[in-house]
Image (cartoon, coloured by chain):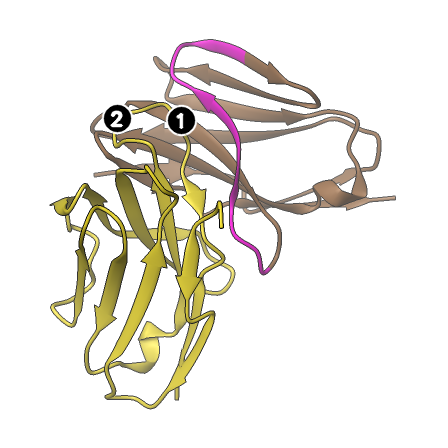
Chain colours: A yellow, B brown
Amino acid sequence: GAGVSQSPSNKVTEKGKDVELRCDPISGHTALYWYRQRLGQGLEFLIYFQGNSAPDKSGLPSDRFSAERTGESVSTLTIQRTQQEDSAVYLCASSLGEFSNQPQHFGDGTRLSIL
Amino acid sequence: GQNIDQPTEMTATEGAIVQINCTYQTSGFNGLFWYQQHAGEAPTFLSYNVLDGLEEKGRFSSFLSRSKGYSYLLLKELQMKDSASYLCAVRDSGKSTFGDGTTLTVKP
């Protein structure tokens, strides 16, 4: 497909479990971003990658959150020992470059619900 | 730190013009983006400003004043489908910081 693809689209899990969210960016996009969006709120920056390295991890809420990117393509966001406050939509976006004037293209997100 | 302010909600009438303001205080600036987000959907790109002035794109225009830390999005000839959340985002180095969005309701 031509767009950013995220999986799963929905995830329901019990508190304390680990979850892994996946993002496939648009081919050729070197920059990749993760955001969290709680219901009725704006986008909260988590982390971004330029290539396979993460120049800015400042938005990760705690050490339970981690992300990696391989092959300048797929990225995974992992949340360990999930808590109820982790319930949100997790959005991934990609763009042609971190300093370019090109906009971010968003995936449809993963809706995460922690019971 | 980064601070971006937008009104929480606005209401306008179909066919009218509406202006959504955004003020920002950021440690750096590499451009300002406006995105549209319909309920339950992903944000989509509307406009980009990096120099002062007005950028026009069809029914939508965006204005930037870097000295004032101010931007607005102007929507003309409003249609019902324009009911959505409008997000202002400032790029600082590689990272973009988003405002909480302005929910626009267009009424007949």
Residue A16 is drawn in which quadrant? bottom left
Residue A37 is drawn in which quadrant? bottom left
Q: Position of residue B34 (x, y in %)?
A: 49, 32
Instruction: Kindly identify which residue carries mark 1.
Output: B32
Instruction: Kindly identify which residue carries mark 2.
Output: A99
Q: Is residue A84 above or below residue B16?
A: below
Q: Magenta span has B48?
A: yes
Q: Which residue is depicted at the point 40% across and 35% down? A: B89
Q: Which residue is depicted at the point 70% across and 46% down? A: B83
The N terminus of chain B sits in image quarter: top left
> Which portion, as a residue range, is magenta?
B40-54
Q: Magenta span has A59?
A: no
Could you say which is closer to the camera, residue B16 or residue A92? Answer: A92
Element at label 2: loop
Q: Position of residue B91 (x, y in %)?
A: 31, 31
Q: Position of residue B76 (x, y in %)?
A: 73, 24
